[in-house]
Amino acid sequence: MADIVGRRKYLARKRRHRRVRKHVAGTVQRPRLNVYRSNRNIFVQVIDDVGGRTLISCSTIDKQLSPQLADKNKVEAAKLVGQMVAERAKEAGISTVVFDRGGFKYSGRVAAVAQGAREAGLQL
């Protein structure tokens, strides 16, 4: 029974993500900031959809961030990941991105990533 419920949730998220991706696409001038949230970690990528390349990535398992995340909860860790990806984007010359929540609700960790990126100077 649990497999059926989990599969149904997974497919519902995939449907939501497809619906969002109809309208959200990353370009060289304004790449897409994609968020994937697992139970333990959060992964963020800045993607150029035209060239089909990942320009920047960051996650909670990143070696540069792991010392800072030791005493943080998941929402605080997601905010730090958002700040780190914004800093890396600014180093790469990217100042504006389009936000792709990946079919997840815009609350909790997903919203914390966006808030952290905004605070670090990235325009969403």
Image (tube, helix red, strand yellow):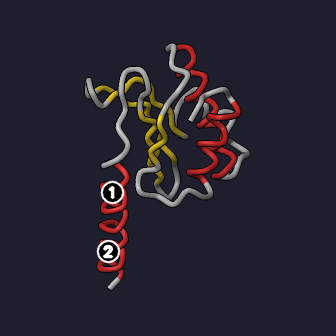
Query: Residue at image x 68%, y 28%?
Result: 120
Give the residue type at disc 2.
Arg
Instruction: Name the quadrant of the C terminus.
Output: top right
| Number of marks drawn | 2
Q: Which residue is painted at 26% across and 28% down in the image?
A: 52
Tell which circle, 2 or 1, labels the residue nearer the N-terminal end: 2
Q: Is residue 93 left or right of residue 29?
A: right
- Give the image location of residue 51, x and y in percent: 26, 23
Tell me the quarter of the picture where residue 87 sits.
Answer: top right
Between 7 and 86, the residue placed more toward the observer is 86
* Label drawn at residue 42: none
Position of residue 62 relative to residue 71, above or below, is above
Contact (Cβ within 8 Å) of mark 2 with mark 1: no
Q: Split into 4 quadrants, where in the image is the N terminus? A: bottom left
- Please identify, in this view, whether the residue under mark 2 or under mark 1 is nearer the observer: 1
Say whether residue 121 is left or right of residue 16.
Answer: right
Categorize mark 1 by other alpha carbons within 10 Å: few (<14), some (14-19), many (20+): few
Q: Residues within 10 Å of mark 2 (few under 14, many from 20)?
A: few
Quick one: SS at disc 1? helix
Q: Residue at x 29, y 79 (%)?
A: 4
- The residue that mark 1 highlights is 19
In which quadrant of the rendered view does residue 54 lie?
top left
State whether residue 122 is above or below residue 115.
above
> Label 1 sits on what residue type?
Arg
Residue occupying the far bottom of the picture = 1
Residue shown at 62% from the left, 34% from the top: 117
Q: Position of residue 88 (x, y in %)?
A: 55, 21
Q: Residue 8: which numbered mark, if any?
A: 2
Mark 2 and mark 1: span between their CA atoms?
Answer: 17 Å
x and y percentages locating residue 39 in the rendered image: 50, 58
